[in-house]
Image (cartoon, rainbow, N blue to C red):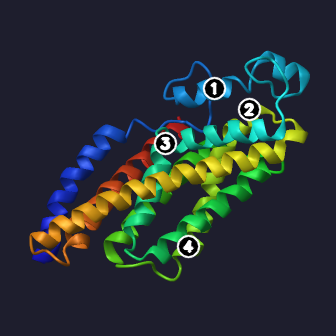
């Protein structure tokens, strides 16, 4: 019993900090609609160039000089948008990736999960951008929040990546891709730039995700070294993975309730 008390206490403190700081912070960064609260200003600024009156009128993506963008220019623009969508704007996507990171200390497990997540959200983002599906934010947003809570709760009880985790991550990745698709529908990508924009955005998202993983790895490595010097060789899961996962789980659950109530209201 005592084995659970210390991480539970620290987890509760961390959970309150996360919930207080982040619960109202997610916002609908996937749906960049001017004039609404809770938007990602940096992302909207990057997207404003795409949504200019000239671009809409001509059916072309224009650069800051008003000239049509080529495929490489479009690709580079969407890479920057994809990175900005994760770092620092995508708090829910960051917490989801952190929950995956905390599930196992094996690099192979992390690579499998992140790659699966990327493939899945690429599928639904592409389908939505092409107009084959039209997901409702009122349904997608609560499920995204619930996915964060689900993965983090699994971390509390399972040490390592369970064999069903890739399938779960793929399913949740499909939903996260539907979230990404919100502002893509607003952009109205020209058909001749569709592939460049889609690939660029996904490369940017992947760079953002890898940035989260890299930062988590450095922090994890530093904490492990400090714990080893203090004589807690096997204490990482007990004092770090479980408390942080608990905080993420409670934050995700709060978001799920908050967004569900907002959808019903």
Q: Position of residue 202 (x, y in %)?
A: 67, 51
Rendered image: mark on residue 186: 2
Q: CA distance from mark 1 to mark 4?
A: 34 Å
- Splitting the image into 4 quarters, where does residue 100 fall? bottom left
Label 4, on which residue? 112
Nearer the observer: mark 1 or 4; the answer is 4
Please give left or right for residue 87 compared with residue 73 in the image. Answer: left
Relative to 167, residue 34 above or below: above
Q: Residue at x 52, y 30 (%)?
A: 40
Q: Residue at x 58, y 61 (%)?
A: 172
Q: Residue at x 36, y 70 (%)?
A: 155
Q: CA distance from mark 4 to mark 3?
A: 21 Å
Mark 2 / mark 1, whichever is N-terminal: 1
Rendered image: mark on residue 44: none
Nearer the observer: mark 3 or 1; the answer is 3
Relative to 6, residue 203 above or below: above
Mark 2 / mark 4, whichever is N-terminal: 4
Q: Position of residue 147 (x, y in %)?
A: 50, 59
Relative to 199, residue 166 above or below: below
Q: Residue at x 76, y 42 (%)?
A: 197
Label 3, on which residue? 87
Q: CA distance from mark 3 to mark 1?
A: 20 Å
Q: Are marks 3 and 1 in contact (CB under 8 Å)?
A: no
Q: CA distance from mark 2 to mark 4?
A: 32 Å
Nearer the observer: mark 2 or 3; the answer is 3
Rendered image: mark on residue 33: 1
């Amino acid at each position: 019993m005592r084995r659970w008390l210390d991480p539970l206490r620290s987890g509760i403190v961390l959970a309150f900090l996360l919930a207080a700081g982040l619960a109202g912070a997610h916002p609908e960064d996937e749906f960049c609609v001017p004039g609404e609260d809770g938007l990602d200003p940096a992302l909207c600024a990057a997207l404003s160039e795409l949504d200019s009156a000239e671009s809409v009128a001509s059916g072309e993506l224009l650069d800051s000089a008003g000239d049509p963008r080529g495929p490489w220019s479009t690709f580079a623009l969407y890479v920057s948008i994809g990175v900005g969508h994760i770092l620092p704007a995508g708090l829910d996507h960051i917490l989801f990736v952190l929950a995956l990171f905390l599930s196992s200390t094996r690099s192979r497990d992390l690579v499998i999960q992140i790659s699966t997540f990327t493939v899945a959200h690429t599928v639904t983002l592409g389908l939505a951008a092409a107009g084959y599906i039209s997901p409702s934010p009122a349904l997608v947003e609560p499920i995204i929040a619930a996915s964060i809570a689900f993965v983090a709760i699994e971390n509390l009880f399972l040490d390592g990546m369970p064999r069903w985790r890739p399938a779960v991550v793929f399913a949740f990745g499909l939903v996260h891709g539907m979230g990404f698709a919100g502002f893509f529908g607003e952009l109205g990508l020209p058909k001749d730039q569709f592939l460049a924009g889609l690939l660029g955005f996904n490369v940017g998202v992947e760079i953002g995700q890898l940035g989260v993983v890299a930062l988590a790895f450095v922090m994890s490595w530093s904490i492990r070294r400090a714990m080893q010097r203090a004589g807690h060789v096997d204490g990482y899961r007990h004092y770090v993975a479980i408390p942080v996962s608990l905080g993420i789980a409670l934050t995700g659950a709060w978001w799920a309730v908050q967004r569900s109530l907002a959808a019903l209201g």
